[in-house]
């Protein structure tokens, strides 16, 4: 899941910019379903570690739910950005699952 680190960082940056999250800790727990230090750990290791498939799926689900809420209310311009991120993230999840199935 080479692109998954990039997607996680893009998602965090977007959500931080939109004031949905205020820290890596909240992003890790609220969007990745991981411990508070998970995103900081990934960043501190210069992206040598790929995020877990579980974290990617949790982010996909969280962003999909957020995107649905925003598109219904049409209160934000980030709905299109969320759609783009979820499409790319799903592609990475699919690649990872296929790779694991053949391993």
Image: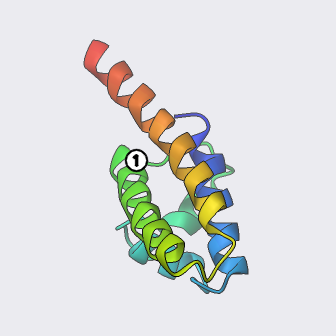
Which image quarter holds the C terminus? top left
User: Left of 47 or right of it: where is 54?
Assistant: left
**Picture coordinates of residue 55, whole percent (x, y):** 39, 55
Residue 54 seen: yes
Q: Residue at x 58, y 68 (%)?
A: 40
Residue 43 seen: no
Residue 35: image quadrant is bottom left
- Residue situated in front as seen by the camera: 24 or 62: 62
Tag 1 secondary structure:
loop
User: Left of 51 or right of it: where is 16?
Assistant: right
Crowd rating for badge 1 (residues with CA inside 10 Å; few <14, some 14–19, many 20+): some
The answer to whether 74 is drawn above or below residue 65 in the figure is below
- Residue situated in front as seen by the camera: 36 or 65: 65
Q: Residue at x 40, y 47 (%)?
A: 52
**Picture coordinates of residue 39, whole percent (x, y):** 54, 65
* Residue to which mark 1 is pinned: 52
The answer to whether 33 is drawn above or below residue 92 in the figure is below
């Amino acid at each position: 899941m080479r692109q998954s680190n990039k997607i996680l960082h893009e998602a965090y940056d977007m959500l931080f910019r939109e004031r949905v999250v205020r820290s890596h800790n909240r992003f890790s727990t609220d969007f990745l379903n991981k411990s508070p230090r998970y995103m900081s750990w990934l960043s501190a290791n210069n992206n040598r570690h790929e995020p877990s498939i579980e974290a990617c799926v949790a982010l996909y689900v969280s962003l999909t739910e957020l995107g649905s809420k925003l598109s219904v209310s049409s209160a934000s311009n980030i709905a299109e950005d969320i759609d783009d991120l979820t499409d790319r993230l799903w592609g990475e999840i699919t690649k990872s699952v296929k790779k694991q199935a053949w391993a």
